[in-house]
Image (cartoon, grey):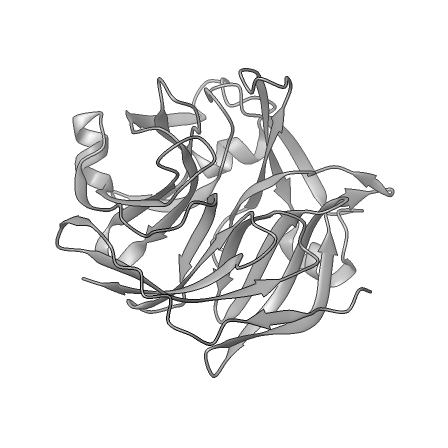
Amino acid sequence: MQKLTLTIIAVVLGVGSITTGTIDHKLNRAITIDSLGACQGISYQNGRIFLYGDREVGVIREFKLENDSLVYQHKEYKLTQNGQDIINHPTGIAYNNDKGPTFIGNSIRLNAAGSQWRAVIYNVNWKGLLKTGTLDGNLINTIEDDACIQGTRPEYVKYNNKWYVATADYGDHGNEVRLYDPEKLAKAKSTKEPGVLYKKFTCTPWVQNLFWKADKGILVLIQNKLEGRQWRFTYVDLKKSIEAGKQVVLSQVDGIDRGDELEGFSLLGGDEKGIAVTSSRKNNVNFTTTSW
């Protein structure tokens, strides 16, 4: 197992934010975490922090927050089966505290121009993956996300007291957030099968990932302002967006002065402290503060 090295930038970055609405989001400091390849996202699960990326194979590594620092737990999970790279570009982990299946997304670029994609959602035995460290014996089902427009990034959300798996597109036109029925999705071979897609609404371009703030009914669209560049956080009212058929924005944070590719974000169990991750080789893990 490779040794983890951390490069800590022990300074406040001093960048502000441009915000519409009442929610503000600020970047405090950055650290560099290696051995992930290009980091693609973060999943916070009851105090456990999972960072995932596209190293020589898709990989997840586990961390713990201790005194505002991330400590590697020496646990690595390779998204391989029989040694073959299965989820090579992980783009979302939908985990729901064992209340439903766990899904991992994979967005596969099929041409250099980025105009053709294959989006796949995997139903995995999450406990088994964490126990054995690979997908061997833990890959339950493979689902083609044919209902998507460009890529997939699954995240659990709750609407009208029922859980759904939301996902979104990354392209520059026709973008949607879609809600899938998790029980039907878990057994499907395609998201175009009857009953899998429940609701959808249009959204703005370049969504890299989703974060669900359950107690506030808010879905955060983690976005780039340009393709593969710059940071944007769009806070939308999920219920109103579904009913309107288009995103209903509560607040948009658009002025964090970073030119790299924002990939993922999660609050750390509360309202304020969070972590945003990028695909950069340096400063790829960023501590943030959200105010409501």
In-image side of 255 versus 210 (left or right)? left
Of 124 and 278, which appears nearest the observer? 278
Could you say which quadrant of the image residue 176 lies in? Answer: top left
Q: Can you say whether 141 is above or below 251 in the image?
A: above
Residue 183 location (% of width, % of height): 49, 37
Q: Nearer the viewer, residue 63 or 154?
A: 63
- Above or below 70: residue 228: above
Q: Residue 157 in the image: state x and y as whole percent.
A: 36, 45
Q: Quadrant of the C terminus?
A: bottom left
Is residue 95 among what the camera can see? no
Pick the front one: 279 or 106:
279
Q: Position of residue 173 (x, y in %)?
A: 36, 18
Q: Residue at x 53, y 56 (%)?
A: 284
Outermost residue toward the left in this view: 21
Q: Residue furthest bottom?
A: 67
Does residue 278 appear in the picture of this structure? yes
Q: Is residue 35 left or right of residue 219?
A: right
Q: Is residue 168 left or right of residue 51?
A: left
Measured along the vertical axis of the image, is residue 77 above or below residue 190? Answer: below
> Quarter of the image containing the N terminus?
bottom right
Residue 195 falls in image quadrant: top left
Can you give x and y, in whole percent of width and height, for residue 113 in the image? 57, 17
Left or right of residue 253: residue 10:
right
